[in-house]
Amino acid sequence: MKNLVIVESPTKAKTISRFLGKDYDIKFSMGHIIDLPKNKLAIDIEHDFAPQYEIIEDKKKLIAELRAAAKGADAILLATDPDREGEAISANIQEVLLDKKIGKDKFKRIVFHEITEGAIKDALSHPRGVDHNLVSAQTARRVLDRLVGYQLSPVLWKKVRRGLSAGRVQSVALRLLVEREREIEKFGKEPYFTIHVILSNKGQDTEFELIEINKEKIEIKKTLNLYDGEYTFAKTTIDTLAKGEKIVIDLRGHTYIVSDVITRQAKRSPYPPFTTSTLQQQAAQRFGLPGKRTMSLAQKLYEEGYITYHRTDSVIISQTAIVQIREYVQKQYGDTYIPQAPRSYFTKQKNAQEAHEAIRPTKIAHMADRVKADLGDAYAKLYDMIWRRAIASQMSDALVESTTVLVDTPNDAKQVYRLKANGSVLLFDGFLKLTPQALEDTRLPKFTTGESLSFVEVRSEEHETTPPPRYNDASLIKTLEEKEIGRPSTYASIISTITDRGYVERVERKFLPTSVGMAVNDFLVKNFATIDDVPFTASMEYELDAIANGEKDWKAMMKDFYKPFEKSIAEVENAERVKIPVEETDEVCPQCGKGNLVVRTGRFGKFFSCSTFPDCNFTKPFVEETNVLCPKDNGKIIIKKTRKGRKFYGCSNYPNCNFAAWKLDDIKTSGVADPKKKTAGTSLKATKKRNMVKKVVRRSYRPSK
């Protein structure tokens, strides 16, 4: 019996071939074989929103090869990815290959969440037909996004600027970033002071912080209602230098008595295995990887058989995997490192697909060194993180002993002060043996209630309240998941889309909306407030899930959506055109001599233009300089971009000098610039670090000897 197995990629085909014999012919489709054409809407609105798919031009030869293989096969096994998109690809392959000689009864759908011999053979023993509910959900998403994108984008061309585009989910992500930027701009920074006293206990100094004055806590918390939730920050009631200095002077003359010593033991439990969202968050935090790069690495690890399917929102792992993990931990670390009963995790997401597994290694024995030798360092780092998280999820709790020491000044004084010092000691590392989390011991000397401590020093520190932080890759993905915007598989594309469009840019790994992004957002919010909002986008995900579960018809959903959307499109014809703000400079235009040069943002980033445009069409490139000189010819190192928008550092004297580097630190080590020019060795990374350090002004007072 001859079986034809069709998967998406050559890598996946190669891995599967290791487990199947000569009776199986394995082919790949290279992803989708049909799609909506790019040059038209291709949705028949009058006939139940039917998508007008076309065969992708460069897939015609591949389809002919698949059809030839299918004719000689007794069974055709559709083995695409186990999600809605994979189901749609299988349905499309079946539809394209069907003819008189290739009947529908030949097609079977098989699903597996890891590419291992056991998983493949289990899938072969449980074939099924294509799940048309999943296909309908994917079709609905595709049609919905096409309608919004292709009908909103022309409106942006007319009312904002030609060449812009909008998307259903991406526009809401952009709104999150713009709203946050506005909230940061509105935030009024306030100064406040903290007071720190160093006291001695039998020759050992300990730093205490002032927490109460006359039994009133000095820390106050404020909560702001932001677009995406609440933001809480803390400050003290000591809001002027004069107040702080008065307290400092008063504290010099007091005696200090230990009023209480509180010791507690607390358990720290491991996190569940990675989901798509948490994997992208951790990769961004630890390695600075954008979601798109993380998913690319994970895709390869999955296709090579190293990890389970990487597009999932489930935290469940199979019982077989749990047994293997517990056996490994027991053998490597001993009985104390495994809990008596296996751990179970449950997702908080309402629409999570619990049938899937979390991301875990397919074989516990496969270590990062093997992945490094096979695929390279980048893959090994991500795999090691996945491996450690999965193993640690079934390990024992860590045990931490925390100590709080409270110190009071005498009650008969005008001002009664209470100070506090905190310490903690790791008693048992448990899961932290595999996933250390920068938990350092802070050991305090032994204090006894009622004992007197010696005064050593007192100081005040000045701080400023900090505004809500800008989003980075990790925090944006976390918010998208919490607000149920998109699916795990879409987070990376959402971020890359708004970045590629020039709506936001990364500054020190944080997202900063551009003037174009703000203009687009403001126009959409003003004219499409219902669509460009979190509740609507989340409700669409519920609708799509209902379709996937067979609870709702996708065509009915589209009718409910389209009527008000069509009305909004018609009404916006009379809306005012939006003017994109520009950054003005003092440089006079060298071409017309009338206007000053301004900084504008186009398809390929920022550029200089005459303020009198379109009367004067002068332009010149926008050059962003660094404080580093080229190690080859001492020219200025400037920031450039590749065709795909990735930043790199190159010499301003190009093409006479072709020096370039991906990282600024690499430039420092690749050569030595003119030693007389001190700026040559300046590290931009160090400069950024200095700029990020919280401003602290210290004023210390020691008793005179």
Image (cartoon, grey):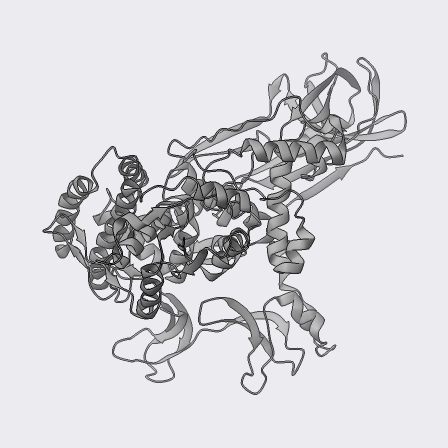
Q: Is residue 641 above or below residue 326?
A: below
Q: Which is more toward the observer, 140 or 453? A: 140
Q: Which is more toward the observer, 37 or 350? A: 37
Q: Position of residue 49 (x, y in %)?
A: 16, 50
Q: Position of residue 45 (x, y in %)?
A: 13, 52
Q: Is residue 398 above or below residue 507?
A: above
The residue located at (47%, 58%) in the rendering is: 13
Q: Which is more toward the observer, 577 or 137? A: 137
Is residue 686 in sight in this rendering?
no
Q: Which is more toward the observer, 553 or 66? A: 66
Q: Residue furthest left?
A: 46
Residue 174 in the figure: left or right of residue 317: left
Residue 498 in the figure: left or right of residue 195: left
Q: Position of residue 57 (x, y in %)?
A: 29, 69
User: Split into 4 quadrants, where in the image is the C terminus?
Assistant: top right
Is residue 50 in sight in this rendering?
yes
Q: Is residue 499 above or below residue 469?
A: below
Q: Quadrant of residue 211?
A: top right
Q: Quadrant of residue 3?
A: bottom left
The residue located at (42%, 72%) in the rendering is: 586
Residue 106 in the figure: left or right of residue 638: left
| Labels in figure, total | 0
Q: Position of residue 461 (x, y in %)?
A: 67, 38
Q: Residue furthest bottom?
A: 656
The residue located at (56%, 49%) in the rendering is: 283
